[in-house]
Amino acid sequence: MGNTFAEKVLAKHAGLSETSAGSIVEVTPNTALSHDNTAAIAAIFKEMGGIHVFDPEMHAIILDHAAPAPTTKHAENHRLIRAFVKEQGIPHFYDIGRGICHQVLVEEGLALPGELVLGSDSHTPHAGVMGAFAAGIGRSEMASIWALGKLWLKVPESIKINLEGRLPAWVTTKDLALMIIDELGADGALYMSVEWHGVALQHIPLSQRATLPNMMAEMGAKNSYVKPDEIVDTFLDGRAKRNYTPIFPDSNASYRAEYTYNLDSLSLQVACPHSVDNVRPLAEVEGIGIDQAFIGTCTNGRLDDLIAAASILRGKTIATGTRLIIIPASSEIYLAADRMGLLADFVEAGAIVESPGCGPCMGNHLGIPAEGEVSISTANRNFRGRMGTMQSEIYLANPYVVAASALAGKITSPQSLM
Amino acid sequence: MEILRGRVWKYGDNINTDVIFPGKYTYTITTPDQMREHALEDLDPDFRALVKPGDFIVAGSNWGCGSSREQAVTCLKATGIAAIIAISFARIYYRNCLNSALPALTCPELIPHVEQGDEILIDLKKGQITHAEQHYPFPPLPEAVQELFAAGGLVAYTRQRLQIARGQGIIRS
Ligand code: SF4
């Protein structure tokens, strides 16, 4: 019997010739990711007796969650982090404005095929888009890695998802992810590694692939892997911080379950309040009034998402009484969007373009809804209170749908505007 | 590592952290001794009065699902529960157990045979549970995790390992 990606990559990083699902291994990550929570982790690190971090090169620290700082308290947190970075001589530090940690990690070539990424953020599986094993861990665990350079991991079982066909117009991988989460449930991949395979992938750009491992966190997955190909190599050319060796699962590996989806028949989906697996076809929720629309986040704030939004918004104006907030996921995307004239399209349509970062995604700042208001967003989570207000509702959809809804002031299909 | 012997408290599937340690206490109750008083309060009102140090919890699938609160592990450890055996664990609950030096063992074959109050033996090193003279294997804990257990949890373990590494000049200062 062959091995899954998770079995092969964890064996490699544990220095073993082989391992299998259910075993516990001790591994050293290539990258240890932390963000605005770095100061809190540093406090645990010191409590553990840490003085110097095990390997400054291993760290990727990106300030994004409350950036720029909305309060003095947040500013003080950032100050502590900058001091820690300086004290420890950490080279891969990205201050406010560079972008959302998961996107920046990929752009900076710090998550590479066959590598191991551990992050103190639940959407760390995002980096699986590069063919890395990437998993979220707790803060004490991160502090222990900083001190000792290693952590134990349980080798997960794996699910294999095969993709066939092509995405229809207006339909994106966001719809695919929502449809799968609806079908398998919010615990459908609990503790598991979700592998993406299939001929359809070659037609899906990296920006859209990334949405898949990103959203698998909402299905309980430990990590999610997209089989790397030439598109990944081309992207990493000139970016990769290290040489890398991709790892591929064996064709006779053993999976807990296998699913095949044909993209040809996929339709627009919306996750309704207050859970990501409360998914309905767009047609069933059309017409629900919205107060705020938000396009951004690590899930759907990349250039292709902004191009999609601009294709809907260009030359039009958003509905009176509706706000539209647009946040490019990184400074690189921000600049590219500016060069393409997209930012002008957005502002002319009545949108607000904010600086790269998480924005209102988790309710820190930059567009928190009022009580009783309804938001539609391209983010990955819609739990009650997620955007900072317990008494508000969040719908999740792809960027075409969110842009179309901003124009109409209610949940709207992009098709109906054409 | 010694062999553990104890009595079983048996529960079902999908037991969430809210009934293991109620969310309403998370900000008011802070010490393990206080947490112990509310362990499994909403699941089994008898548990707190009758549990003895060294007892085990045996459960179905997805034990500890829901919020990631660490109190749901700490409160059971404070009652003296010596191990939790389940068909499966929620991911963060599982990690919290091992990082708190509480054995969380996955042994699906055992579960249907065990009743409330039964006595079982656990050999952590060998990876074997004995019940009614039948042996049930589970993946043994690797050395790294056994060391973590011996130290008493992740924070203490890291502190110890750092001191050793410093002594050997393996890490800086
Ligand atoms: S954009 Fe949202 S989901 Fe992504 S890292 Fe930031 S807060 Fe988390």
Image (cartoon, coloured by chain):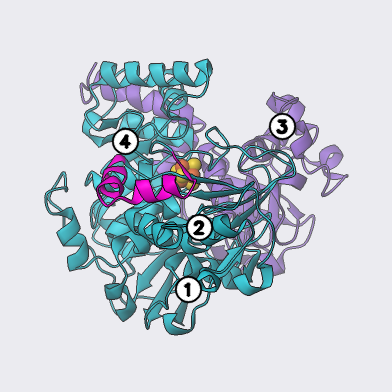
Chain for numbered disc 1: A
Residue under label 4: A98
Residue A198 image point, x, y percent: 33, 78
Chain for numbered disc 4: A
Residue at 48% from the left image edge and 45% from the top image edge: A351
Residue at 30% from the left image edge and 40% from the top image edge: A331
The one nearer the camera, A415 or A171, is A415
Tell me whether the residue at label 4 lies in contact with that at label 3, contact meaning CB atoms closer than 8 angstroms.
no
Residue under label 2: A403
Residue under label 1: A256
Residue neighbourhood size for the residue with mark 3, other residues' Cα within 10 Å, grouped as few (<14), some (14–19), many (≥20): some
Highlighted range, magenta: A331-353
Residue B7 image point, x, y percent: 74, 50
The one nearer the camera, A70 or A113, is A70
- Are tags 1 and 2 found on a single chain? yes
Left or right of A111? Residue A394 is right
- Are tags 4 and 2 found on a single chain? yes
Note the chain letter of the purple one.
B
Residue neighbourhood size for the residue with mark 2, other residues' Cα within 10 Å, grouped as few (<14), some (14–19), many (≥20): many
Chain for numbered disc 2: A
Tell me which amino acid carries mark 3: Thr
Q: How far apart are labels 1 and 3 at the CA level?
A: 36 Å
Q: Earlier in the sequence, mark 1 or mark 2?
A: 1
Marks 1 and 3: which is nearer the front? Answer: 3
Secondary element type, mark 1: loop
Note the chain letter of the cyan one.
A
Q: Main secondary structure of the magenta part?
A: helix
Tell me which amino acid carries mark 4: Arg
- Residue A101, magenta (yes or no): no
Chain for numbered disc 3: B
